Image: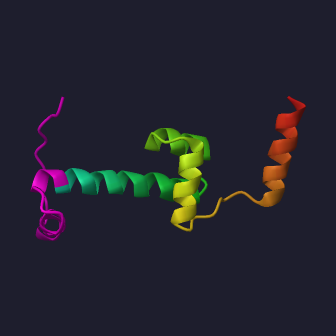
Amino acid sequence: MAKVVTLRLKEKELGFIEELSRKENGDRSHAARKLIDYGWIYFILKNYKEGKMSIGKAAKELNLTITETIELLADLGINSPITYEEYLEGYRNLKDI
């Protein structure tokens, strides 16, 4: 169920919403929700890129599979913060289990 939230927005922020709603021939509410979704995706991917979050945690937060998350990262040109050696070590540890 949708809830109503009241926000104070600056003219610049309102302008973003207005511009997106015009470009997509939609309403302002839809545009605002879309921008919030994009902001959340950016926030999660930035945390992953900075090594503050694992790929599994990022996938869970984005409600994607790990494979879908890896593809999204690749599409955006974001490399993994771990080195190839760290990857191999993790793989060897996994094989030992």
Q: How many labels does the image show?
A: 0
Could you tell me which quadrant the C terminus lies in? top right
Tell me which corner region of the image, top left, top right, bottom left or bottom right, holds residue 90.
top right
Q: Position of residue 50 (x, y in %)?
A: 57, 59
Q: Can residue 54 be seen in this view?
A: no
Report the residue at 53% width, 64% height from top. 75
| Horizontal side, residue 2 vs residue 80: left or right | left
- Residue 94: x, y in percent? 82, 36
Say how the picture is coloured. Answer: rainbow
Residue 92 drawn above or below residue 49: above
Q: Position of residue 39 (x, y in %)?
A: 34, 56
- Quadrant hosting residue 12: bottom left
Tell me which residue sits at (49%, 42%) in the image.
64
Q: In which quarter of the image is the N terminus?
A: top left
56 or 8, nearer to the observer? 56
Question: Residue drawn 52% across and 45% down?
Answer: 58
Quadrant of the image occupied by residue 16: bottom left
Query: Is residue 38 magenta-colored?
Result: no
Q: Could one spot residue 27 in this view of the protein? A: yes
The residue positioned 42% from the left and 58% from the top of the image is 42
Q: Is residue 73 left or right of residue 25?
A: right
- Region rendered in magenta: 1-30
Left or right: 55 in relation to 64? right
